Image (spheres, helix red, strand yellow):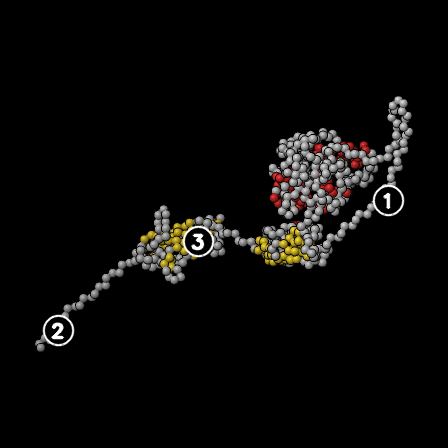
Amino acid sequence: MTAQFGRRLRKGATATTVAALAVAALSASQAPGVTGAHGDQPAAGATDTPDTPVTGDSPYYTDLPPLRTPDKPGTSVNLPGSPGSAEAGIPSSVLAAYKRAEAAIKVSDPGCRLPWQLLAAIGKVESGQASGGAVDDNGTTLKPILGPKLDGVGFANISDTDNGVYDGDVTHDRAVGPMQFIPSTWATWGQDGNGDGQKNPNNIYDAALGAGRYLCANNRDVSVEEDLDSAILGYNRSTEYLRTVLSWFEFYRSGSHEVPDGEGVLPGNSLPDSGPVGAGRPTPGASPTPGPSTPGPSTPGPTEPGKPTPPATTPPAKPTPPTTPPTKPTPPAPAPLTALERLGARTVTATEGENFADRLRVRGETAAGKVVKGAKVQFQIVGDTGARFPGSALRVTVTTGADGIAAAPALSAGQRTGTFTVRAKALSTGAPTTDFGATVKAKPAPDPKSDALARTSDKALTAQAGGSFADLVELKATYKSKAAAGVGVSASLVTDGAAPVENDKGPYFEDAAGKAVRTLTGLKTDANGLVKLPKIYTDGNAGTYKLRLTTEDGVVLTVELTVTAAPTTPPTDTPSTPPATTPTGTPGA
């Protein structure tokens, strides 16, 4: 590995100076060291990796990333590797697949904290970013990427598990695709990353999502060093592999950029194909074959007795490379985007202070109805609203994927109710805009609560039989000693005893028709927590009765009602007729 690193950095500097700078730079970035390698042995601490690693311990590309250019005036050595360098370029579809996998796992397993740069590091080491981005519009490799036959000769011995479906080999398994899954591992971890209904290890979207799911297995948090190492070693149980992946991980974290598919930098240590449709993957730790050079004068070796010494030969002159590079064929221009098709609901709704559950999505299409990949689409909030995209943005720009779909990020409703519009517009085209209607509803009032119920008066409630109570019953509900508004209350005249039921005699209420009822429901406390019961009437039965009052929260208050007997009417006295008198005669008549 050290020899390879030196080969890559000797240009423009002495080997000693460059090697020293390389070690210093990698140490400063906490990348693995480039000297003192112990070879491809199983690393310590790999106990939670599977019995068979993802790749079956297949070979991998051992190129290390270039160093970043020192950002210091007057630096004596200008090392390669700025964020804009060729090695930092990742093919468009490959980069999109890594980022899509990161986004999906952020939703399904946020505790894993998987960064797309880790997938990029593994993709670089396993397949040179899908052979430099040699994929079609759906993300499937233009030809299968296969590792060597895992027949136990230098690698694991894994008999065929897929009947040759993925690797074309019916005797032994091979690692398959841009993330190099062996078929038996893909059977467990395969994913449909591009939504086409298939799980294809040769598709970068499917393979990247499958790799991400595997790296996050066993509740790993890859922001923790131990979990990160364990995840990587599950791919290939080698300390050298771990160092190589971590080197590319740190490299991509410090900067990268997108390049067109097919124009990614291929690894420099490729070896001949390992099979009829192989990807040309190297043996782990193999030094690159030196390129052609101009040899010096040859020195004849010892000759056999009796044979003349062959004359010294002058090597042929090194051919002069052409000054004008060959012209690449110009690919046909893609058909222009002419329409944005709205996907999902025309209108979306959310409650103030929350996010809209529905993501706004459009699909870019040509006039012939074919999807358009890589088109820029802007989503803009139009209208008087507090709704915003992440970062309090009123507009965001996203790129259509291989399926032609552009999905806006989550939209926050804000704190203002009302309606507004989100307008989708294809940039740099004359395609018509597409609008979504959006409504923000008020947050519903919380359910009223009460923890106490009491009368507002302690006056005894008494009435005569056949009459009515002069005083109305007024109650107050409170919650934590404060008036509880809107609390539902029921009132029922019940029997006495441990299990009271509605009474069939004694006091009663009247309904709208004047009919006697002994239970009322639907009573509500006002803004002050008060509720007043209607008049209570009495029948002809005297006695003591119970009025049971209950709130929606189960708070119970029992009020005693006393009914006295009606007074008895005394008999009417008839005055007696005085006796008749005889008139007295006149004296001397």
Given residues 244 and 505, the one toward you in this image is: 244
Residue depicted at 65% across the width and 43% down the height? 200
Disc 3 on helix, strand or loop?
A: strand
Reading the image, the residue beneath label 3 is: 489
The mark that comes first in sequence, 1 or 3, is 1
Q: From this viewpoint, which residue is outermost toward the front?
A: 306
Residue depicted at 49% across the width and 54% down the height? 485
Q: Mark 1, residues whose alpha carbon is within 10 Å: few (<14), some, or many (≥20)? A: few
Depth check, mark 2 against mark 1: the one in front is: 1
Q: Mark 2, residues whose alpha carbon is within 10 Å: few (<14), some, or many (≥20)? A: few
Residue depicted at 74% across the width and 35% down the height? 282
User: Which image quarter holds the C terminus?
Assistant: bottom left
The mark that comes first in sequence, 2 or 1, is 1
Reading the image, the residue beneath label 1 is: 323
Q: Do the residues labelled 3 and 2 touch (CB within 8 Å)?
A: no
Reading the image, the residue beneath label 2 is: 583
Q: In this view, does 180 lie above or below 38?
A: below
* Quarter assignment of residue 115: top right
Residue 458, how many percent across, how many down? Answer: 40, 52
Disc 2 on helix, strand or loop?
A: loop
Q: What residue type is labelled 2?
A: Pro
Marks 3/2: CA–CA distance: 83 Å
Q: Mark 3, residues whose alpha carbon is within 10 Å: few (<14), some, or many (≥20)? A: many
Q: Which amino acid does label 3 sit on?
A: Val
Residue depicted at 71% across the width and 33% down the height? 240
Q: What residue type is labelled 1?
A: Thr
Determine whether, in the image, residue 444 is placed left or right of residue 473.
right
The mark that comes first in sequence, 3 or 2, is 3
